[in-house]
Amino acid sequence: MTFGTFGLAFLVRPIGGVLLGAYADGQGRKASLMVSIVLMTVGTLAIAIMPSYETIGLLAPIGVLAARLVQGFSAGAEFRSSTAFLVEHMPHRRGFVASWQFANQGLGRVLSSAFGVGLTVWMTTAGLSAWGNVSDRIGRTTHMIAVGLLILVSAFPAFTVLTRTPVPAVILLAVVYLAVLKTIYFGPLAALMSELFPPATRATGLGLSYNIGVTLFGGMAPATITWLGTFALIGDLAPGYYLTVIGVMSLAALIAIRTRGRILSGRDAAEADPACFMSRSWP
């Protein structure tokens, strides 16, 4: 039930991504980001000041759930508007500037997690930016396929070691190792996704695709892994199996993009819609 409630907030992310994405494409990135910030503030404040169950009964958990849905709606809009805003202001260094999207998310997790100490030792903000620069030189898919293969062959062995030797040192090393791989993988991701859509529909496309993925494979991951763990042949290795399957799906998507998809370069995007960088509503 707890994991289901956690995942429920993610279900409204695609809705927020589509509605506020369309708003961003029509009214500008800044306007949409302001709406997203206000909604997140309202949802967070509502949780902070919500009376206890002893005071208002069932209205307390219902109110918290409603606030979480508001937060999810807001979060669904944040990624696509901020990414579109970034890449459209530095079209020839998209990998670098878009890598800050996930670098800043990582920084937030560092500040709120004990594992942040390990992350700051292994990968600094400057390092994250450098990986974003690497993708500007060698290509997004080349970078992500290489790291994705490393994640694919690492996930299951890492969780096998964790289940057989669950001591603090091993847990810390495994989590830091996987976190560093994830950080390197995420560096060019925002730039790659932005280049899959033309400027006129970029915010909507980013909002829908990103939030569907986050909802299905992120928000529902705890519930899915818990369910997989009920099978005797899987058991405690459920996270390893889950990440392996997701890794295969990610590599298949990257290969499809590399072989069949058309990625818009900075020059292509400018030629497709020169006003996208100079429009009155996007600066």
Image (cartoon, rainbow, N blue to C red):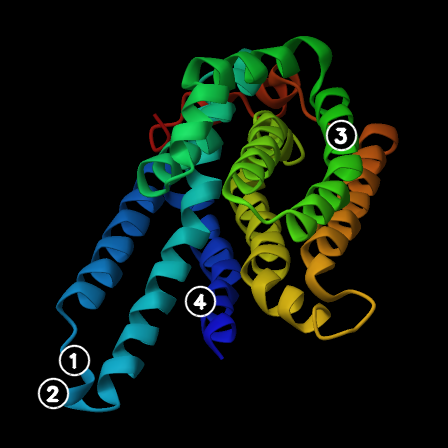
User: Label 2 to label 3, Cα distance in Å?
Assistant: 52 Å
Could you classify mark 4 by the number of other residues whose Cα lies within 10 Å: few (under 14), some (14-19), or many (20 or more)?
many
Q: Going 48% across and 33% down the picture, which residue do you hit?
A: 102
Could you classify mark 3 by the number of other residues whose Cα lies within 10 Å: few (under 14), some (14-19), or many (20 or more)?
some
Q: Going 57% across and 60% down the picture, which residue do you hit?
A: 215
Which amino acid does the dot numbered 3 rest on? Leu
SS for callout 1: loop
User: Label 1 to label 4, Cα distance in Å?
Assistant: 21 Å
Q: Earlier in the sequence, mark 2 or mark 4?
A: 4
Q: Report x, y in % for residue 196.
A: 67, 34
Toward which corner of the image does residue 273 lie, by quadrant?
A: top right
Q: Are marks 1 and 2 in contact (CB under 8 Å)?
A: yes
Say if 227 sits above or below 166 in the image: below
User: Label 3 to label 1, Cα distance in Å?
Assistant: 47 Å
Disc number at residue 150?
A: 3
Q: Going 82% across and 28% down the picture, which residue do you hit?
A: 258
SS for callout 4: helix
Q: Report x, y in % for residue 146.
A: 77, 24
Q: Is residue 165 left or right of residue 46?
A: right
Which amino acid does the dot numbered 4 rest on? Ala
Could you classify mark 1 by the number of other residues whose Cα lies within 10 Å: few (under 14), some (14-19), or many (20 or more)?
few
Which amino acid does the dot numbered 2 rest on? Thr
Residue designated by label 1: 52
Residue designated by label 2: 55
